[in-house]
Each structure stands twice: as C-alpha cells, then as structure tokens.
Image (cartoon, rainbow, N blue to C red):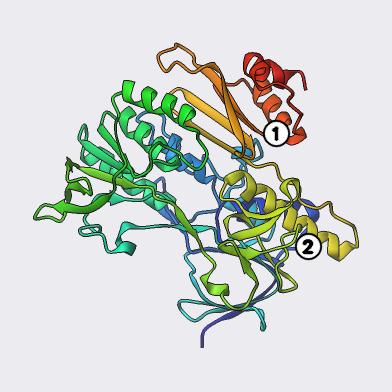
Amino acid sequence: MASEKHFKYVILGGGVAAGYAAREFAKQGVKPGELAIISKEAVLLLTGTIPVLVVAPYERPALSKGYLFPQNAARLPGFHVCVGSGGERLLPEWYSEKGIELILSTEIVKADLASKTLTSAVGATFTYEILIIATGSSVIKLSDFGTQGADSNNILYLREVDDADKLVAAIQAKKGGKAVIVGGGYIGLELSAALKINDFDVTMVFPEPWCMPRLFTADIAAFYESYYTNKGVKIVKGTVAVGFDADANGDVTAVNLKNGSVLEADIVVVGVGGRPLTTLFKGQVAEEKGGIKTDAFFETSVPGVYAVGDVATFPMKMYNELRRVEHVDHARKSAEQAVKAIKGKESGESVVEYDYLPYFYSRSFDLGWQFYGDNVGDTILFGDSDPTSAKPKFGSYWIKDGKVLGAFLEGGSPDENKAIAKVAKTQPPVANIEELKKEGLQFASKI
C-alpha cells in the first residue's frame, strides 16, 4: 500500500520560489508539520566521507555565474536561498527546525485539484488544504525537435545543480577545448563568458540579428557583441544548429549549421529558452499567455490553489495587462505575495495587490547591467558605449507617449541602478528627446 500524507500547505516545486515562500511562511507563523515542499530535485553532497542526498531550495542564478568560475567557484551549501537577495541562508537544518518537511527526489505525476490530491511517480499520495504551484520551467531541448545527433554526450543544458555539475565535469575533461554555445539570450551570453574564462575556444550561435533580442536594442547588443569579440568569443548570427556529429564513443565532435558551415566542438551548451511546467494542471485551472492565470494575490481560478514564479500569468498593475515573467526577482516576490495573501485570508487582514516593476539583470566578464520597466516605444542611447573603454558605462531609455517607460544601465553603481529603477516606476514626462540624450544618467538622478 503506497503511503498517504496530509499537510495544511503544500508547495509543489523546490526552486527559488519555494524557498522564499517557506521563509515567508516561517515569518508569518507556521506550525511544525503544516507545510511541505515537494521537489523532484536532489543532490549528492559530499560532506566528509559520507555522501548526503539533499537539496534545499537554492538561488538558481549562481549556476550560470559563480558555479562555473575556474577559481573560488560557488558550491552548495553556499548559495541556498535567501542569500541572492541579501537574506539569511536557509540550510536543510533550517527547514527541519521549523518543522517544514522537504520531500525531495519526488516527482508528482498527477494532480487532482478537485480532491486536493497529488500522486507521485511511485504511487505515494499527498493531500493538502492549500497548494502553491511553484513548478517553474523546464529547459527546451534540441532533442524535442528531433535535431539529428542532439542526444550525443557533452551536449549540455543548464537548469539544476545536476546540470551544472555535468558542465563542470565536461569543462575539466575537455580542458582548453572548443565550446559551441547555442542561443543568444541570458544563458548564451553568460555561458560564453564562463567558458571563455575557463580558457575554451568559444563560438556563440543564434538565429536572430543580434543577441538578447527580446530586451536589447541593436545599439545595446552591438556593445556586448563587440566586447565579447574582443575577448575572443566568436559570434555566428542568423543561423541555427541543424545536427551534431559524434565519435565512436558518442561524444559530440561538431555542430552542423543551417548555413552549411560546420563548427568543431568538444562541448556544446544549449540555451534556447524554457517552458513553464503547467501540464499537471491542464483543464483543471484557467490558463493565459502560456501560464496559469492568477489574480493580484496569485490565487488561481481554483480557490485555495496559488501559482507563483514562471508559471503564473498575473495582472501587472503598472501596465494594466496580464503578463508572465520568467525571472528570479519575480519568483521571489510572487512567492512572498502568495503566502502573505494566504495568511491574510486566515487572519482577516487585507493584503496590498501585487504591483511589480519588471526587473532584469545579468553579469558576465567584468560587465553588469540592469533593466527596469517596459521596453516599448522609441529608444535613446547615452553614455560611453565604447567596448574598448576601461570602464564602459552607458544606458538607454524607452520613451512612449511622451513618458519614459523603461531604463537600462551597464556599469551602474547601486545608487545609479536605484535611480533608473525610479525612472521606470514613476514614468516621468519627456519634453525633448535630444535633451534627454544629452542629460543621460543625470536625468535619472534628478527624479
């Protein structure tokens, strides 16, 4: 007979959102045994001579950054939540001290929202009163499209610690080899830099006319592409990988591109996006824009069921429209909001509606940028965007209907980044675009 366990609250998913939700529950007050986190992830930690299988929620962004450093690399337990936002580090012991159950290596294969029951791959059942769906995204794999040779060895993806460990092992095994990075978004840019720092010969391949096309303008992208080129990263645009060659051991040796060229490769890292993990709930809950539709408190169309992070399509108050946001900042904040709403309902206290300012950032080489707001309308570029400068510092504003709606800054200080966030939040009017271009960052610091 498979086991059955009951909890008052269940968080499904063990990523960033789960960790921040657990911290908020602890802050608001949760009794031992009331809360469980069910996650399919688990990691073998070697502490002394005894391997321990555990992975409490951790800050995922470290995987594409510090985890891959050739020296002083980040490792668990160093980047458990909530260190990424300056909070305390919640080790596995923290959860047990609070009486929060971490149910790891457990894949849920069936969710019945009507009977409030989750069933695992081995037939165990979990019942709940309130459910928080924090399942996040899965990476899109080239094998999903039937790309020839896509299951060869050393064609790698990055989502979980397990993936990062495989990448670290490949970097060590193929020292000084050739790496091809497929994709020109976050993962593409961050991993190209990481592999270059690890002394690989790096080529980046993506189909769009410039990198990070969903956010960057052509001007912003030109800076990063030149900077990367100067660092020795080769960039191939306007084409895609259509197949891979492998040797007799099944190890990848080359990437065949649609434009007919062939790139030698010892390691391939693919970063072509993710898919929100909502399949378990299909037909049981309202969906919109590829996610699960929620209100401003992250409650879904099913009372007592909440969805946070990547999977939630929520009302973005600032722009008066429903949006889905795949970013760690929103994963943290939406998780906290859902728990505040759950606890507020219980105590009869009102909770303020979620009012999110979109925020994205990235770090690679000696660079670091932040973006706030909405990238719509006309753009201007200001500052020093010469990729050969010792310390480049430049930015962009997005202007629509005479107001600044979005702001981007490379190389900003914490105060300057706060200033551009304020611009995006307050949406100040702009009388003269040429004047704004001249003022640049000064415009932000006056607000």
Q: Position of residue 133 (x, y in %)?
A: 62, 64
Q: Residues within 10 Å of mark 2 (few under 14, many from 20)?
A: many
| Whether label 2 touches label 1, CB < 8 Å | no
Mark 1 surroundings: few (<14), some (14-19) or many (≥20) residues within 10 A: many
Which residue shows up at 8% across the image and 55% down it?
A: 248
As displayed, is residue 411 above or below residue 49? above
In the image, 328: left or right of 275? right
Which kind of residue does numbered mark 2 sit on? Answer: Ile
Nearest the viewer among 164 and 359 is: 359
Image quarter of residue 284: bottom right
Residue depicted at x 74% and y 61%: 295
**Location of the C terminus (image quadrant):** top right
- Asked if one can make out residue 102 in the rendered structure from this viewpoint, the answer is no
Where residue 71 sits in the image (x, y, percent)?
37, 28
> Is 183 left or right of 217, judged from the image as shown?
left
Q: Position of residue 159 (x, y in %)?
A: 44, 51
The mark closer to the camera, 2 or 1, is 1
Which sits earlier in the primary sequence, circle 2 or circle 1? 2
Q: Secondary structure at mark 1?
A: helix
Seen from the viewer's position, the closer of residues 398 and 45 is: 398
The numbered mark at residue 424 is 1
- For this orientation, the residue located farthest to the bottom is 1
Residue labelled with disc 2: 342
Inter-mark Cα distance, 2 to 1 = 30 Å
* Picture residue at 58% right of the left edge, 60% below the top: 311
Q: Amino acid at mark 1?
A: Ala
Is 237 drawn above or below residue 350 in the view shown? above
**Nearest the eye: 287 or 17:** 287
